[in-house]
Amino acid sequence: MHVLGISAAAVVLLAALFVQSFRAKWGPVQRAVRRFNRDVTNPRQLATAGRPGAYAAVVHHRGRVSGTAYRTPAVAVPAGDGFVFALPYGPGADWVRNVLAAGTATVEHEGRSVEVQRPRLVDESEANRFFPPREQRMHRVFGVVDFLHVAEVGR
């Protein structure tokens, strides 16, 4: 039983260190999480992303230098004239930089393909109100303060 208690305490400590490192935007932790998501989580999410009831939408964008077409799963929340995305890694994520540079993208959300434009970075006071309370709590826990707003073409 003693070993089990020590193991549980170690897991709790590691989780707390992870959360604090992520909140502090510590580069090694953010890079490791991004790499894991890119190589493991994202390919699996793309199998269902964008469909009705899926956790994530799909953002179709082009590389700002290469022009290569990319598909990135991201949580899109309807926000009046378009969508808001929480940016847990900040505005420096490649897909965000690509969308900002191009000024347009396509978002697959709930089975709909939507052309979007006028991307702009917004702060939590403007964006968080569109997220459910549970997501807002997660933003606070992980220190998410950056968001991207995109407007649907024609709105």
Image (tube, grey):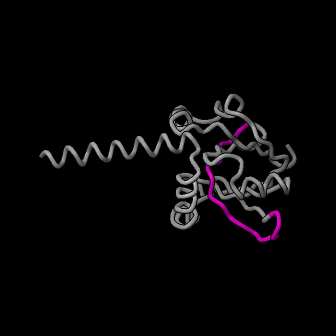
Q: Which residues are magenta?
A: 64-79
The answer to whether residue 20 of the structure is visible from this angle is: yes
Q: Is residue 92 left or right of residue 117?
A: left
Q: Is residue 76 left or right of residue 35?
A: right
The answer to whether 36 is drawn above or below residue 81 in the figure is below
What residue is rendered at 76% in x and 62% in y?
61
The front one of 63 and 19 is 19
Q: Nearer the viewer, residue 141 or 82?
A: 141
Residue name at image x 85 percent, y 42 percent: 155
Q: Quadrant of residue 54?
A: bottom right
Residue 84 magenta-highlighted: no
Percent across and percent down for residue 64 are 82, 63
Which residue is rendered at x = 71% and y = 34% of the image?
123
Position of 51 compared to 65: left or right? left
Main secondary structure found in the magenta portion: strand
Q: Residue at x 50, y 35 (%)?
A: 141
- From this viewpoint, is residue 53 visible? no
